[in-house]
């Protein structure tokens, strides 16, 4: 039962994370390969603040806001690049963040990471806190879903799609494309930071290796597999990817081969990602093309 | 209206537009013609801000617009179509139109959460308007289809419809009738005449000469980046320079 709680909590945190990426990738068409950086900024900020005595909820809020601020600052130069070049810049940004976490030992603890991150007071700690933490994460995921639903099924979301489909048309229609994209990144980074903070306070230990390229691919897979440009798609994708990862643990593998499991899993994710993009780019839940009431 | 003053643009060594100056008449339809590669589309890109001028100025309604980014120029009331149709293929036909309304309250995040009633009312009005535009351009049956499913000609009409949604003061059309069948052309001509009668200014590039003669109140002719003629459609056929531009110069030998 505790194991199921654990899986559901991880699923929901990834659901928040995937939805935040989907706002940028699915709606605004911004191929952000460095989304993990904002997840990491939220996680480290919230962990460091709570370790120095700030109440956990406040620390999480500040972590999310700092991630949003980082998103705003990052947008200014990065959004001057278009298409693939933007993707490269996001990738580099994530690598910078990763190196920062790794090397600023005085602040982040370097490769040893940060242990003993507190859980929120009302959930308690230890195994018996799991159902409460699950309820907390579920609440966060529902709020995220509702806010993103409001933002995307609206004239704002439609303008993002116009920009995604044809940036010149958007400009010809008077849309300030830079402003829209910046807002998408700021909101996306805010929720990525929230997901990171949830992660830090759930796992209670973070280290730079949690915020590497591998995780970027994982969240990208959640969005592409589930269906980008819909709000249910990334949620479904997150559940599918996390459950698949847990399922692999139960495959009976002879002990002498276990060291190959993790790399093989990474390769499998990459392969699924490529296959999805080639064979079913719309994902499991395709984006509805009928016009909906906003 | 729209005034160009010594507008120039080069790409490397090629002078695509050179020293073009003119003022559009206040009302009616103005046409821009010229052989392929004479700089017409470049000129349209310069007016709408998609290219940055090398030299010269563009003024619209007494304000300078050259140097502004495309979305600012659009917000000032100059809305354009593109030579290659550019509908938003994955959005529904209706959404293609509603999205074209400028300055929507619901496109800003704060009102979206704190003034939902007003956003919803505005959205309802915009959708009503989109339906009436769809009736004008005869695409009402395709309302919910993705715009990518429309035929080429229908996509051209949808682009015109999108311009109408923006309530512009000046409409700039880059070859509106290219590649569409004669019955749709008649449909389009009716729409353009109707707009003219509602005193919306139109400036278009067109190759179909009978159509230009029928629609336009004044004509500008470009050749090799320069403006070689401006005047009435009646006079253009008799102009020596224009004939040379289209048919070539007689050999001296």
Image (spheres, rainbow, N blue to C red):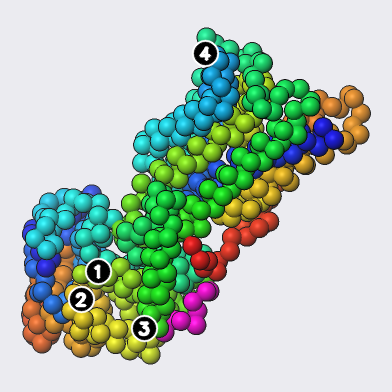
What subunit carries mark 3?
B
> Which numbered dot is residue B136?
3
Quote the CA–CA distance across marks 2 and 1.
7 Å
Quote the CA–CA distance across marks 3 and 4.
64 Å
Q: Position of residue A234 (x, y in %)?
A: 63, 48
Quote the CA–CA distance across marks 4 and 1.
56 Å
State if disc 2 and disc 3 touch (CB < 8 Å).
no
Furthest residue in direction top, as rendered = A106
State if disc 1 and disc 2 touch (CB < 8 Å).
yes
- Up-down: is B209 above or below A241? below
Instruction: Specify few, some or many for label 2: CA neighbours under 10 Å numbering under 14, 14-19, or 20 or more.
Output: many
Between A34 and B152, the residue placed more toward the observer is: A34
Counting residues from the start of the chain, the first of labels 3 and 2 encountered is 3
Counting residues from the start of the chain, the first of labels 2 and 1 encountered is 1
Q: Residue at x 91, y 34 (%)?
A: A252
**Residue under circle 2?**
B200
> Which numbered dot is residue A107?
4
Q: Secondary structure at mark 1?
A: loop
- Up-down: is B187 above or below A195? below
Furthest residue in direction front, as rendered = A122
**Residue under circle 1?**
B168
Quote the CA–CA distance across marks 3 and 1.
17 Å
Q: Secondary structure at mark 4?
A: helix
Boundaries of the magenta span: B136-145
Check if mark 4 and mark 1 are on a common chain.
Answer: no
What subunit carries mark 2?
B
């Amino acid at each position: 039962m505790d194991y199921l709680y654990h899986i559901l909590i991880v699923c929901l945190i990834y659901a928040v994370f995937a939805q935040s990426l989907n706002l940028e990738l699915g709606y605004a068409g911004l191929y952000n390969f460095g989304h993990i950086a904002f997840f990491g900024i939220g996680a480290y900020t919230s962990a460091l603040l709570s370790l120095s005595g700030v109440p956990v909820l406040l620390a999480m809020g500040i972590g999310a806001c700092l991630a949003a601020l980082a998103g705003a600052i990052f947008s200014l130069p990065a959004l001057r690049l278009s298409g693939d070049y933007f993707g490269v810049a996001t990738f580099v940004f994530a690598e910078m963040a990763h190196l920062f976490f790794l090397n600023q030992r005085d602040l982040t603890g370097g490769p040893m990471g940060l242990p003993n991150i507190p859980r929120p007071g009302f959930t308690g700690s230890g195994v018996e806190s799991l159902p409460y933490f699950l309820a907390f994460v579920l609440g966060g995921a529902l709020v995220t879903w509702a806010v993103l639903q409001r933002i995307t099924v609206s004239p704002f979301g439609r303008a993002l799609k116009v920009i995604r489909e044809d940036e010149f048309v958007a400009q010809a229609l008077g849309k300030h494309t830079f402003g829209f994209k910046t807002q998408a990144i700021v909101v996306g980074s805010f929720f990525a930071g929230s997901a990171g903070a949830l992660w830090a306070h759930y796992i209670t230990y973070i280290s730079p290796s949690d915020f590497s390229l591998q995780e970027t691919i994982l969240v990208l897979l959640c969005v592409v597999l589930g269906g980008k440009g819909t709000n249910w798609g990334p949620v479904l994708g997150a559940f599918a990817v996390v459950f698949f990862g847990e399922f692999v643990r139960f495959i009976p593998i002879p002990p002498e081969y276990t060291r190959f499991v993790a790399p093989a899993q990474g390769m499998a994710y990459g392969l699924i990602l490529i296959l999805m993009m080639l064979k079913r780019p719309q994902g499991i839940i395709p984006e509805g093309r009928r016009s909906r009431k906003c | 209206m729209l005034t160009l003053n010594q507008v120039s643009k080069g790409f490397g060594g090629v002078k695509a537009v050179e020293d073009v100056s003119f003022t559009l008449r206040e009302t009616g339809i103005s046409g821009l013609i010229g052989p392929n590669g004479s700089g017409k589309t470049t000129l349209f890109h310069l007016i709408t801000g998609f290219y940055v001028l090398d030299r010269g100025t563009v003024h619209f309604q007494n304000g300078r617009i050259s140097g502004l980014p495309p979305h600012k120029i659009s917000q000032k009331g100059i809305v354009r179509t593109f030579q290659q149709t550019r509908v938003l293929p994955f959005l529904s036909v209706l959404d293609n139109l509603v999205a074209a309304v400028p300055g929507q309250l619901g496109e800003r995040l704060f009102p979206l959460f704190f003034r939902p009633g007003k956003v919803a009312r505005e959205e309802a009005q915009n959708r009503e308007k989109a339906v009436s535009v769809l009736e004008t351009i005869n695409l009402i049956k395709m309302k919910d289809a993705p715009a990518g499913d429309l035929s080429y000609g229908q996509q051209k009409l949808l682009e015109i419809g999108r311009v109408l949604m923006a309530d512009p003061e000046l409409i700039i059309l880059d070859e509106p009738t290219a590649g569409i069948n004669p019955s749709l052309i008649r449909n389009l001509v009716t729409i353009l005449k109707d707009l003219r009668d509602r005193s919306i200014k139109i400036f278009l590039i067109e190759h179909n000469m009978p159509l230009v003669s029928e629609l336009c109140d004044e004509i500008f002719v470009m050749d090799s980046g320069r403006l070689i003629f401006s005047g009435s459609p009646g006079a253009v056929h008799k102009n020596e320079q224009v004939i040379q531009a289209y048919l070539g110069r007689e050999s001296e030998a």
